[in-house]
Amino acid sequence: MQTDFDWRSQPHTVIERDGVHYTLLGTAHVSQASVDAVKAAIASGEFDAVAVELDEQRHTAMNDPEQLARLDIVKVIRENRIPMFAANLGLAAYQRRLAEQLGIEPGAELKAAAQDAKAHGLPMHLIDRDVGLTFKRAAERLGWWQRLKLGSGILASLIVNEKVEDDAIEKLKQGDMLEASFSEFASDSPALYDTVIAERDAWMAARLRESAGDARHVLAVIGAGHLAGTAKHLQESTDTPTDILARLAKLKPKSGIPWFTIFLAVFVLGGFALGFWQGGLDVGSELVLYWLALTAGLGALGCIAAGGHPLSVLAAALSSPITPLHPALASGMLSALAEAGLRKPTYADFLALRDDISSLRGVYRNRVARIMLVFFLTNLGTALGVWLGGAKMLGRLMS
């Protein structure tokens, strides 16, 4: 055990509040020195509780490598959680590339903090916000074009195995895994910075206050990029932790009325009716055929590109003309459910998933990864069909 390492040589600050001394130890997520500092600080006996910049999901993933093998992929599809599942896999793929490139597991110091706290019999608190919640709040504040770039970046991270850029590695040396990960998916954005960094500073400060309990000397292991912000919130915030956490967990309520779907349905069905009324059977039939051919054809093409089963391709073709007009259905969902039923993922597929997504060949070989590709590419094909079909219909009616 490393006990002679001077952990105070690493970035840190001490905040006293409400009779509790909080020592914020700023770490780099790709640094052996940070791992040694964490181990030495916990072994020093100076602290009676440890807080770690992890959420429950990331902590479980670090300590339970077979967690994925217990996943119900059909339930994930039906609950429309494929995008969030893909985002987590994209983060895992990114971390794996970093580990291979740098020779150290990203976040090893956070894992060491959680394990050593338990080994020394100290209370251990997870103080970071759930990564899924952070992703949702970030997506809410992005425009449709930025969301498209973010989504396509996540999809690309699953099938492209390229070297991590130097600027992303520098961000990790400054200490934040999510900031470095998101920087690969989208260009610099104040909304992304605010949700990925600034909001989490306030969240972790509130969680530290909330979880302190009877402890009087708390060691908080956080990325160096969060050190100044978390210290400021910890020292200056006057709101209660409960109020802060509630505010930073709030999501915009979904509209009860699916306006876009209603508009699209009125446009498409109204266009058909107008075509039959103005141009008779020939024009009306032509518009219907345009819509069916473009949506069904491109939806099926997306499924084919994903390597879907022939019956999954058929499901994509049959559902693509209809699902854009229904607020609760998506062609990608139906084709992915068909794929999951026709090619049921095995236990081995789940165990190999994190390795397989590091290469394009592995993605197509792994049944879980291929189901996700079927979901995304079918939806993408259908969306292209909707836009092209709508434009064709508009042009024909105006001619």
Image: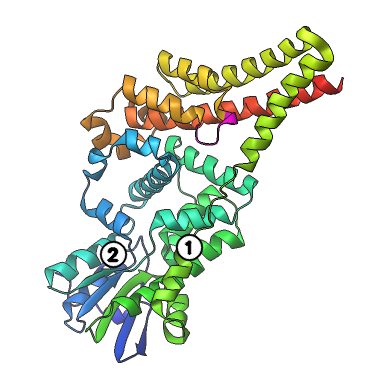
Circle 2 residue: 109
What's the coloring here? Answer: rainbow
Would you call the spot at circle 1 few (<14 residues within 10 Å), some (14-19), or many (20 or more)? few
Would you call the spot at circle 2 few (<14 residues within 10 Å), some (14-19), or many (20 or more)? many
- Asked whether the viewer can see residue 193, the reply is yes
Q: Which residue is at the front of the view, 158 or 274?
A: 274
Going by the numbered disc 1, the residue's amino acid type is Lys
| Residue 306 pos. (x, y %) | 46, 24
Q: Name the residue rendered at 42%, 70% in the picture.
A: 245
Magenta part of the chain: 324-329
Q: Which residue is at the front of the view, 335 or 12?
A: 335
Going by the numbered disc 2, the residue's amino acid type is Glu
Q: Earlier in the sequence, mark 1 or mark 2?
A: 2
Circle 1 residue: 250
Res 339 → quadrant: top left
- How far apart in space, not on screen, are marks 1 and 2 (Cα)? 30 Å
Res 21 → quadrant: bottom left
Quadrant where the N terminus sits is: bottom left
Q: Name the residue rendered at 44%, 26% in the picture.
A: 334
Is 391 located above or below residue 90 in the figure?
A: above
| Residue 26 pos. (x, y %) | 37, 73
Is 300 located above or below residue 3 in the figure?
A: above
